[in-house]
Amino acid sequence: MTMRLTEPVVLGPRTAPSRVVFGPHETNLARGRALSDRHVAYYARRAAGGAGLIVTETASVHPSDWPYERAPLAADCGPGWTATAAACAPHGALVVASLGHAGSQGSSAYHQSALWAPSRVADVVSRELPMELEEPELDALRAGFADAARIAVASGLDGVEIEAGQHSLLRQFLSGLTNQRQDAYGTDRALLLRQVLAAVRAGIGDKRLLGLRLSCDELAPWAGITPAHAEELAREVAPLLDYLVVVRGSAMAVSATRPDFHTPAGFNTELCAAVRAAVDGRVPVVLQGSVTDPARAEDALTGGSADLVEMTRAQIAAPELVALVRSGHPERVRPCVLCNQKCRVRDNRNPVVSCAVDPRSGHETEDPPDFPRGRPVAGTAAERRTDAP
């Protein structure tokens, strides 16, 4: 029986070969601030495994944003994006670039200048006091998104995804907790987001994908973005988009961003269903949030909670997930156990992304090729011109 999970889905001007998304996440695979050959191999392996939409690691759209040491910078990512598009194209996967700016949730450790923010509100985690953006910086930010998007599509990517999720300057403008401005950007907190989306669309045209990752619940103890607010915002921006990813969290709830097994899998399902109902078919909606089981993903699709499902950690653990489900062998999918031991890389050691149940993840360019099962070790060693044990 065919599962909806493995069916193609139309996203604006493009068609993804499956409804499974490999979402943007930090990898520490960059060299300098550019995508490396390790990125290319990492994404190509998921494309070969059947992912329908691959979103590359979020690239900063302006040099003022350097949130972690190996964070990609869009201006330096052209060659890496070109190589990634070429590596994934034979498998049919759509590839888009995640573009963002961390704002006050970034770090001044690397660029040694004030963080950008809608208002001078200290970040609740780092306690850094940012600068309030004036019109020159806002102009530079809008231009940065548009220029980065043009670089991405000129590099052969299928489009871009704008980051307004948990760690983003755009979310900070949307929230009353961090946006206390008295000008137009304060009275209409969605103004900057609409301007950015319009600038990006003008830069890439209508033949490429434009997606949005939106925090639909900041989980703040007071005020902030609530589900009701997010539903209204989703209806407002839906006509500008080709797909919408529903996420939750903010600096007020860091532990909710990427929870481990203590949080029930699929925790965003009800939130995603509410947003999907609000947009009423005007844009495909993506469920994100610890969905690691193909059966749970299928339930979300058939139950009307989502049009696509982001299964990032599931595909770090089992890159061939979609191919196995499509071939009728979901029981052979290597399960993600939501331990966060190797795939969470934001610490001072700068470890590269990997997986406790698939150590090859993140090391695709380093491992030796697989050998046919059942062959004598001595024969294999001889073929490789090494001494047999």
Image: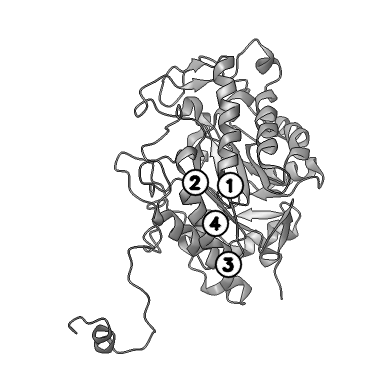
Q: Is 28 left, or right, of 144 in this rendering?
A: left
Decide which of 377, 325 is in the foreground and name it.
Answer: 377
Q: CA distance from mark 2 to mark 4?
A: 11 Å
Q: CA distance from mark 1 to mark 2?
A: 8 Å
Of circles 1 and 4, which is in front? 1
Q: Which mark is residue 81?
A: none
Question: In the displayed structure, would residue 389 be above or below residue 140?
Answer: below
Q: Which mark is residue 154?
A: 1
First in sequence, mark 2 or 4: give its number: 2
Q: Which mark is residue 91?
A: 3
Residue pushed farthest front? 154
Q: Which residue is mark 2?
A: 78
Residues marked 1 and 2 touching at CB (< 8 Å): yes
Q: Which residue is mark 4?
A: 85
Q: Quadrant of residue 185?
A: top right
Q: CA distance from mark 3 to mark 2?
A: 21 Å
Question: Which residue is depicted at the point 52% across and 39% down?
Answer: 256
Label 2: few (<14), some (14–19) or many (≥20) C-alpha neighbours in 10 Å: many
Q: How many marks?
A: 4
